[in-house]
Image (spheres, grey):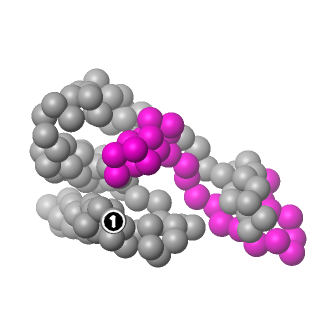
Amino acid sequence: MIKNQNNAFSYLLLILLLSIPNTILSQLVTQEYVKELKKDRRGPYKDIKWFCEDGSIREARDPCPEPMEGVQHARYKDKVQSLADKHNLFLDQILVGTENYKFWDAAHDHSRLKQYQITNFLYDADTHC
């Protein structure tokens, strides 16, 4: 499964990188950084945390105290998060906790939604090869 995710991640990066002008691309994502992400077993993710309804963030093995609810999911590495925040470039998607309007991304011509669709297509294509 990890190999398939890495392949789909590589394909997504290729498509996204080809859609960005080269001058911007060379400033945003270097080949060395892509290689670094591919070698790292965590890929674009930094860690896993609990995100509690009161806004607190807790360690993976320390869930939100009852009766408070929360969700557990990965966080992006700082540089990956910066690419998303500053350039609307999502190297992979974490949708848990994402508000609908942010995923819809009307301000950027639905770029995030499109990137999500491309990622799903590539994962599916990779698993059926």
Q: Is residue 72 visible?
A: yes
Image-quadrant location for residue 112: bottom left
Give the vertical position of 21 relative to 64 (above or below): above
The crowd level at tag 1 (other Cα within 10 Å; few <14, some 14-19, many 20+) is: few
Q: Position of residue 114 (x, y in %)?
A: 25, 66
Q: Whole-percent x and y of residue 102? A: 44, 67
Which amino acid does the dot numbered 1 rest on? Ala
Q: Is residue 25 left or right of residue 108?
A: left
- The quarter of the picture where the C terminus appears is bottom left
Front-lying residue, 38 or 12:
12
Mark 1 residue element: helix
Residue 29 left/right relative to 11: right
Query: In this orientation, which residue lies closer to the viewer: 38 or 14?
Result: 14
In the rendered view, would you say 17 is above or below 40? below
Vertical placement of residue 28 versus 98, above or below: above
- The verdict on residue 70 being magenta is yes
**Which residue lies at the image location 36% right of the left edge and 35% below the top edge?**
37
Q: Which residue is farthest right?
A: 66
Can you give x and y, in whole percent of width and height, for residue 48 in the image? 61, 50
Q: Quadrant of residue 38?
A: top left
Q: Residue at x 17, y 44 (%)?
A: 20
Q: Residue at x 86, y 64 (%)?
A: 65
Span shown in magenta: 62-88
Query: Does residue 20 belong to the magenta stretch?
Result: no
x and y percentages locating residue 94 in the rendered image: 47, 60
Image quadrant where one finds the N terminus? bottom left
Q: Is residue 55 above or below residue 23?
A: below
Residue occupying the point 55% across, 49% down: 75
Q: Which residue is mark 1?
A: 107
Q: Nearer the viewer, residue 101 or 97?
A: 101
